[in-house]
Image (spheres, rainbow, N blue to C red):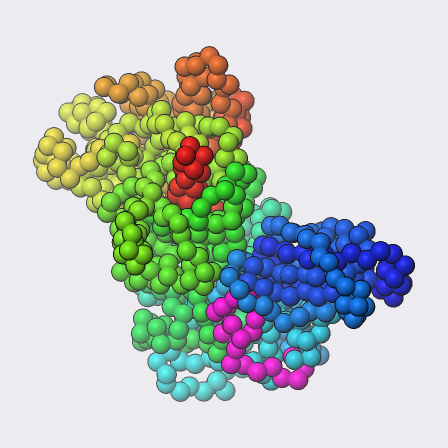
């Protein structure tokens, strides 16, 4: 409708005054200009303003126009926005006040208690990219170009409401041209707090990391980004300042450069991620589905794990296998900033792009920190002058069972809130501290969960320090005060100890008795996170939960890791498990997989029977050379050899037995990752199901708990080793047999639960969680088997199934129990 005509129509109808409060991710995403545009088109008078709780709209128009305004706000919200609620309230306004308001304006931001959400960082949009590649545009080759729909958010905001003075761009005054864009509501850069240009913004500068001078004129280059691309093409290592931290880059087709990068990073074998210029460039190396292409090109721009193309090695310069040894996938992402795009305009091949840290350390976000870590090892850094307020690592995703699944939630996703299912709106505010590995923490309030970006493994002292800073920074930034704290039950986790220390400090400051944190069972948190991720209502009843991972402390004080339960948010009833097998050497068994193989073979066959029947096997020769006398004493006396019902350790044992990752695991889960990579997919799809390795489901002595017994699997696998069956075939048979048994166990538990009380409806939903379900082959086969039996399968999407999702589960469990306690009182 013509705005003038709409305005004329307003005068002829009864006017209504409304205040609309829009809550959600609505600041820093171009939401106010969208409101201004829609209101102007509808002839609505009034104003829109950012406040600490979201966006506040005061609107004057006929009732029908206000209905259209509310409807179009949802339908036409900017891509990065997410509306959680629009609260509407009628206002009374004297006629003379109505007549004094003309048109619709965007007003200055208001303060107040922070209840809004912080948008996640977003990859450069197509319009900004077009500008930096257009020789006639004033931002031609300006690498820090962004607008209201892309660029830094969490990584550079320092306060709320979201305004330029509360970002790390506060010291960069806008030039006349940028100011004109910034102040024009019709421009896509209206109040885009990160905008700048060649004239007024920070510059990208290529320098030596050791501070020594060097001459760029020794190279043919257009600018510093172009020169960095030239250095990469020559085989140099180059640090690049990204959105949320420094990254280290090298030519992915240069074996010497990749080897040097591994030495610098102290990263022995764990796969590196790569960056390519476009989806078409990625397709030269990987099979890319439409879902995966959309994921690569999304504003979040995560690393996506993609199947390697079998014919990719035939190209003139192949990606060297040292980038991701012994796995079947490449991890690719697309350029997230103008800096990366311009570097790759010169460097035509894929580059390795990994966090600027040594393994397990936090990523460097200042030049001084980068220099301290890598001075003398990395010669060059492509730097820029926009400070990073908050460290944010790259996100990792994989398409499993036809849908994108986040394996690491960070840049592009965090800290976007996750709307909790119905029933949680009554929950108190909860701070959940997460686990020990792949740590994230979670803030729950107003029926929503806000997850921190991925932080890492808390065993590293520097990561611990970074975690504590983030644990202080984000709640303070959002003015969040928890009423309930939640943590893992393991008393020795750093996160658990911190939760108890914070509770004591809070009680001391308030002069009150200490309210201890809510301890949440590790595997209950896994299942609860899956339920919350899938919108499972608080009162929807239980599901069969399957939590498969490496290790977590069980409620009996033993180590668990292969758990079957009937569970909801408040309760977790363990109904089945994997066979508990000793871990000789404790944590050492996770780093030396052969120890798990030895423990399994001794537990299942006995050493004498194994040697009598299988002495000619390579694994037998390997184990005969180990210190078995010491191991046997540990196993017999239970010294540093705790029992663990761990699915992850079973994968380690099988991988080592067939010659994959036997002596030393260079990273967590290496055996399982490489075992999955060796699966023959044709065997998986077409070989007779009966050739899948069998497992039994007997009951544990004492508890009568059903468990997955691998004796028959070991007999079949060892027989295949004698027959010299190809490793890919054995890997497929293991996955196939295990998936079938997992589904069978779930079905038995569901049937037994219903039969125990004839009045109970049968459970028809199964939730899959835990790091083992990062395995695409296993996940898809388990899901298929369950669906064949009539079950609906719940799997993670927004939140990792690994320990990176524990904090959400802890928060959901603590909130559910608090709600039940309030209702009970």
User: Which of the image's four quarters has the N terminus?
Assistant: bottom right
| Secondary structure, magenta segment, majority class | loop
Q: Which residues are magenta?
A: 156-178
Q: Compare residues 328 and 369 and report the one nearer the observer.
A: 369
Q: Which residue is pictured at 48% across the width and 69% down the height?
A: 158
Q: Compare residues 352 and 104 and report the one nearer the observer.
A: 104
Q: Which residue is pictured at 69% across the width and 79% down the height?
A: 180
Q: Which residue is pictured at 68% across the width and 53% down the height?
A: 89
Residue 160 drawn in magenta:
yes
Horizontal side of 87 relative to 678 (left or right) equals right
Residue 404 location, quadrant? top right
> Residue 485's spot in the image, x, y percent?
36, 48
Placement of 100 over or under 633, stated as above or below: below
User: Which of the image's four quarters has the C terminus?
Assistant: top left
Q: Compare residues 22 and 366 and report the one nearer the observer.
A: 22
Res 3 visible: yes
């Amino acid at each position: 409708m013509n705005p003038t005509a709409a305005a004329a129509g307003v005068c002829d109808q009864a006017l209504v005054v409304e205040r609309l409060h829009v809550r959600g991710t609505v600041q820093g995403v171009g939401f106010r200009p969208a409101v201004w545009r829609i209101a102007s088109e509808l002839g609505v008078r009034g104003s829109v303003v950012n406040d600490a709780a979201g966006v506040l709209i005061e609107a004057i128009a006929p009732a029908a126009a206000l209905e259209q305004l509310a409807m179009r706000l949802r339908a036409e919200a900017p891509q990065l926005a997410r509306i959680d609620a629009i609260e509407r309230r009628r206002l009374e306004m004297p006629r003379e006040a109505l007549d004094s308001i003309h048109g619709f304006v965007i007003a200055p931001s208001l303060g107040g208690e922070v209840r809004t959400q912080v948008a996640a960082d977003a990859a450069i949009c197509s319009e900004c990219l077009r500008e930096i590649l257009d020789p006639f545009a004033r931002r031609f080759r300006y690498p820090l170009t962004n607008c209201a729909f892309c660029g830094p958010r969490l990584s550079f905001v320092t306060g709320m409401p979201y305004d330029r003075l509360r970002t790390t761009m506060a010291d960069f005054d806008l030039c006349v041209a940028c100011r004109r864009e910034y102040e024009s509501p019709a421009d896509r850069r209206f109040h885009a707090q990160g905008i700048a240009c060649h004239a007024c913004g920070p510059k990208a500068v290529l320098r030596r990391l050791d501070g020594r001078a060097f001459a760029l004129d020794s190279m043919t280059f257009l600018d510093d980004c172009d020169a960095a691309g030239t250095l990469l093409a020559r085989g140099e290592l180059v640090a690049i300042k990204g959105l949320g931290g420094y990254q280290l880059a090298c030519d992915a087709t240069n074996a010497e450069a990749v080897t040097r990068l591994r030495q610098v990073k102290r990263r022995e074998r764990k796969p590196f991620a790569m960056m390519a210029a476009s989806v078409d460039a990625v397709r030269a190396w990987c099979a890319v589905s439409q879902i995966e292409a959309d994921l690569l090109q999304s504003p979040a721009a995560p690393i996506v794990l993609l199947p390697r193309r079998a014919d990719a090695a035939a190209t003139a310069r192949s990606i060297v296998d040292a980038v991701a040894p012994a796995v079947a996938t490449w991890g690719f992402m697309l350029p997230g900033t103008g800096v990366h795009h311009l570097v790759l305009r010169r460097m035509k091949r894929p580059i390795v792009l990994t966090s600027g840290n040594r393994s397990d350390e936090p990523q460097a976000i200042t030049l001084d920190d980068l220099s301290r870590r890598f001075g003398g090892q990395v010669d060059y850094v492509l730097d820029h002058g926009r400070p990073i307020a908050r460290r944010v690592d790259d996100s990792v995703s994989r398409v499993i069972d036809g849908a994108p699944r986040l394996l690491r939630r960070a840049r592009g996703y965090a800290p976007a809130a996750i709307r909790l299912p119905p029933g949680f709106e009554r929950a108190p505010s909860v701070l959940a501290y997460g686990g020990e590995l792949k740590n994230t923490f979670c803030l729950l309030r107003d029926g929503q969960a806000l997850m921190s970006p991925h932080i890492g493994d808390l065993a590293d002292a520097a990561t611990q320090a970074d975690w504590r800073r983030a644990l202080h920074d984000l709640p303070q930034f959002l003015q969040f005060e928890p009423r309930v704290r939640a943590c893992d039950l393991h008393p020795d986790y750093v996160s658990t100890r911190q939760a108890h220390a914070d509770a004591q400090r809070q009680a001391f400051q308030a002069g009150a008795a200490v309210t201890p944190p809510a301890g949440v069972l590790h595997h209950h948190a896994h299942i609860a996170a899956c339920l919350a991720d899938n919108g499972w209502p608080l009162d929807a009843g239980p599901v069969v939960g399957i939590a498969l991972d490496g290790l977590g402390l069980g409620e009996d004080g033993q180590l668990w890791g292969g758990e079957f339960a009937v569970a909801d948010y408040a309760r977790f009833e363990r109904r089945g498990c994997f066979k508990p097998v000793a871990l000789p050497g404790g944590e050492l068994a996770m780093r030396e997989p052969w120890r798990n193989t030895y423990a399994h073979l001794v537990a299942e066959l006995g050493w004498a029977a194994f040697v009598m029947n299988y002495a000619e096997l390579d694994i037998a020769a390997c184990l005969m050379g180990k210190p078995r006398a010491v191991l046997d004493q540990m196993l017999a006396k239970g010294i540093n050899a705790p029992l663990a019902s761990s699915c992850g350790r079973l994968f380690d044992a099988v991988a080592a037995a067939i010659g994959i990752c036997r002596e030393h695991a260079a990273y967590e889960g290496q055996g399982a990752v490489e075992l999955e990579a060796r699966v023959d997919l044709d065997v998986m799809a077409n070989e007779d199901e009966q050739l899948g390795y069998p497992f039994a489901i007997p009951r544990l002595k004492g508890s009568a708990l059903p468990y997955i017994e691998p004796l028959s699997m070991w007999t079949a696998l060892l027989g295949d080793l004698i027959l010299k069956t190809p490793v890919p075939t054995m890997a497929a048979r293991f996955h196939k047999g295990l998936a079938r048994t997992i589904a069978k166990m779930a079905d038995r538990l569901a049937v037994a639960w219903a039969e125990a009380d004839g009045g109970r409806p049968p459970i028809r939903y199964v939730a899959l969680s835990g790091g083992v379900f990062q395995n695409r082959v296993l996940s898809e086969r388990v899901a298929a088997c369950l669906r064949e039996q009539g079950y609906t399968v719940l799997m993670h999407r927004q939140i990792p199934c690994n320990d990176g999702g524990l904090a959400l589960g802890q928060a959901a469990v603590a909130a559910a129990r608090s709600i039940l306690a309030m209702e009970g009182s």
